[in-house]
Amino acid sequence: MYKINAYMNEELNETTYETKLDNGLSVYICKKPGYKKKIGLFGTKYGSVINDFVDIQTKERIQVPDGIAHFLEHKLFEKEGANALDLFSKIGVSSNAYTTFDHTVYYFETCEKFQESIRLLVKLIKEPYFTDENVVKEQGIIGQEIMMGDDDPEYKVYFNSLKAMYQKNNVKIDIAGTVDSISHINKELLYTCYNTFYNLNNMFFVVVGDVDIESTIRLIEDSVNSYSNITIKEDVEVFHHEEPTEINEKEIVEKMDIYLPQIYLAYKLKVAKKEEIIKNALVADIVSQMYFSKMSGFFNEEYNKGVLVENPVLVYEGSSSFSYILLGAQTLKLEEYKKDILEYIERIKKEEVNEELFTTIKNSKIGSLVIEDDNLNSCYRRVIDSILTQTEVYEDVKILNDLTKEDVKIFLNYMTEKNRIVSVIDTKNK
Amino acid sequence: MKQIYKINNNKFNSMYISINFTMKVNREELSKSALLASVMGKSCKKYKTQTEIETYLSKLYGTNFDVNVQKVGELYNIEFRLEQVNKNYLPNKTDVLENNLKFLYEIIFNPYCHENEFDKETVERERVSLLQKIMSKKDDKTAYAVYRTEQLMSNNQIAGEYLFGDEEIVKNITSLQLYKQYEKLLNDSCITVILSGNLDSYEEIDVTIDDIFRKKLESKYLFNELNINSNKNDKVEELEETSELQETNQSTLTFGMRVLNATQQDFYTLNVYNAILGSTPSSKLFQNVREKESLAYTVKSRFYRFNNIIIIYAGIQKANYEKAKKVIHEQLKQIENGEVTTEEFEAAKQSILADLLEWEDSKIAIAKMLFSNLFAFKSDNVTIQEMCEKISNVTLIDVQDIAKRIKTEHIYLLGGEADV
């Protein structure tokens, strides 16, 4: 029998329940009284950066082609020729799936078909169906998806930043892989990845909405247990190439047929752990608001000079194998912007952090968390973040309340010349 | 009269305040309105720059503010909108409502002007900013292809203008002209105020609004007095094929289609038609162009309720142009011939019904639905339930009938080595 833990947050007036089923699966339910919509989400801690691991059945180490986690997502969301999106759509339920660097999720959103949606979602994930033909068909569709990304300047400038920062870590490779790498994927490899990473111990189920806690947990458990392939339940062994602290390339410049050039500065950091990841992300938001938003003197100056129209945005992204800061902007005056922002960063690192401004922005950020909480998607994202960082749900609210201006100072000093790269997508027709 | 709508639900933590100025514009006025919205969103007499605005708002616990523009058929809407936390969710029940409403008053009724013209420096900055938006429209390939198709379909009418205006016109607007447009906005708009979200503990909100805005939110027009579409859509145009060159890895194919002689009540049937055709994963386009033929990752159709047009867009390889066209034509023909399975038909309806129910879980979406209905249905009391019933009552015969009135006018290709 499982024990249900309840995590209550006062600021948001909200409770999330958590339990680990006997079959190994972790279940989280974020209760949202009064909402009609319910979201169900089945996920695995398996994403594009993992391509070297121990096959859970043969116990042998294996390396698989880039893009296979994403390919598997496409193939798993399909049942005997029918696309899962279509199966859900037929009963009036919208669904989708996505793959990131470190996790893959499948979800549905429904007002009225909650129970059957849970059963269908479990069925899809528990009954893989890969054939030689449907693998070939998917290579065509994913090929188009990859090319769509190639025409998107924002996507390109982002991925080139990762390529510039990382030498070994697969975070530098497009989540969908390349047209070439996916041509090496076959149904046997898909089954190997599936068996290894879609074992229940490596998975999680999240529900957001106005549902009954115990009966929902029971429903999920019964649905999952009705499939025979639940026997393997162990932790997976994954190998990451040792990533040097040094960056890979100082600068990547690419040209595209666009009007407005894109520029990212990125800083490669030491891998952070648990609460640190959550904290870095929150401090990054505050730093972005204090120093780069429309209220900053820097933006105002650059705006008056005609260098910037929209403000730069700073974010932090971290997982168990990577950690970095991105500072993105669009400008017609690349050289001027680069010179000014680099000088500015050096300047703010030396300055005192303004206490009053820090407190104002911190309070504003607390208000933003309350507003965002009206969106059910924010609720499940919080739960997923807590699962991946192995922290308690609502840890973000607690960490935010405890932040001090010293945290800002420390964060700013992460940005040094040594760990910095520049990624530019320039326009072709100057 | 004053048009204030309140949609209260205490499941939310916050409130959405939306003040809309909707008016008829010509081509020049559309560009002026776009620039005006940009200037008014970034300055007012009390807070002269974006920096001052943002600094002020940052003290109000995460209050979000911006000025949004939208084409409502041939009308142009400038929306001053704000999102704020309900006081029950703030430490010591701090209330930011009054400050927020006063702020909106300053933004709308006390713009940064000297006598009868806007501050020149501010106008110049916003002009640069707006021009950049206009010129970078081609950077998002799919959105650009869809916009170009809207333009091709519009016969030089307002509906085909770019949302942020025309480069040449924007370059030449003076701060004096901008002030004239501002006066027009105040005097010639239909004004709609929508408050949506958690309104608990704000029982006196009408009084507060009256105290702050006095008579200034009185609207000259009722929502049902403005015409959103003067195009009768009663002529069949000859099919034209156009292509446009851009260096890309993928091309975007679009179909621009017109619904002939559409009436208000066709709205429901057209939604079902569109869902069967291409707005859901069960649709004919998704199933055939993507799943069966592997021609595209993205393939969708979009119904424009204010203009009664439908646009299909697909990201394809240029080499597959003819094949993709053929497959799309086949899908259109099938619906016209009533070759729609019960499964396809029910899936389309189910997906629309589910979407309608979900609107009520978003304070912004439900406000937008109310706003669209005001102008499209000329009614302020259409309920979600009523909309659901009307969708449920649509028959396959209705869909087939409407399909016969839908004519493809433009086929457009953006991308790669275009030499069609």
Image (cartoon, rainbow, N blue to C red):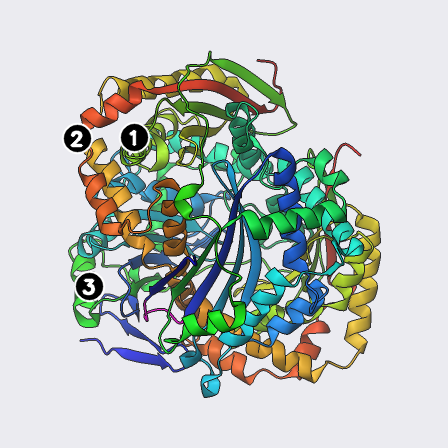
Residue at image location 29% in from the left, 79% down from the top: A5
Q: Is residue B21 magenta?
A: no
Picture coordinates of residue B333, whole percent (x, y): 31, 17
Q: Residue furthest bottom?
A: B92
x and y percentages locating residue A335 in the rendered image: 83, 50
Q: Position of residue B21 (x, y in %)?
A: 52, 51
Whether residue B330 can be seen here:
yes
**Disc 2 with disc 1 on a shared chain:** yes
Three-letter residue code for mark 1 = Tyr
| Dominant SS in magenta | loop
Q: Position of residue A77 (x, y in %)?
A: 32, 44
Residue A35 found in image quarter:
bottom left
Disc number lying in front (2 or 1): 1
Q: Image point 20% across, 54% down: which residue?
A: A112
Magenta span: B9-13
If the image is split into quadrants, where does the C terminus of chain A sit? top right
Q: Provide the residue designation for mark 1.
A: B273
Q: Chain of mark 2?
A: B
Q: Nearer the viewer, residue A202 or A333?
A: A333
Residue holding disc 3: A221
Relative to A148, residue B45 above or below: below
Kind of residue indicated by mark 3 = Glu
- Under circle 3, the secondary element is helix
Mark 3 surroundings: few (<14), some (14-19) or many (≥20) residues within 10 A: some
Discs 3 and 1 share one subunit: no
Disc 2: which residue: B342
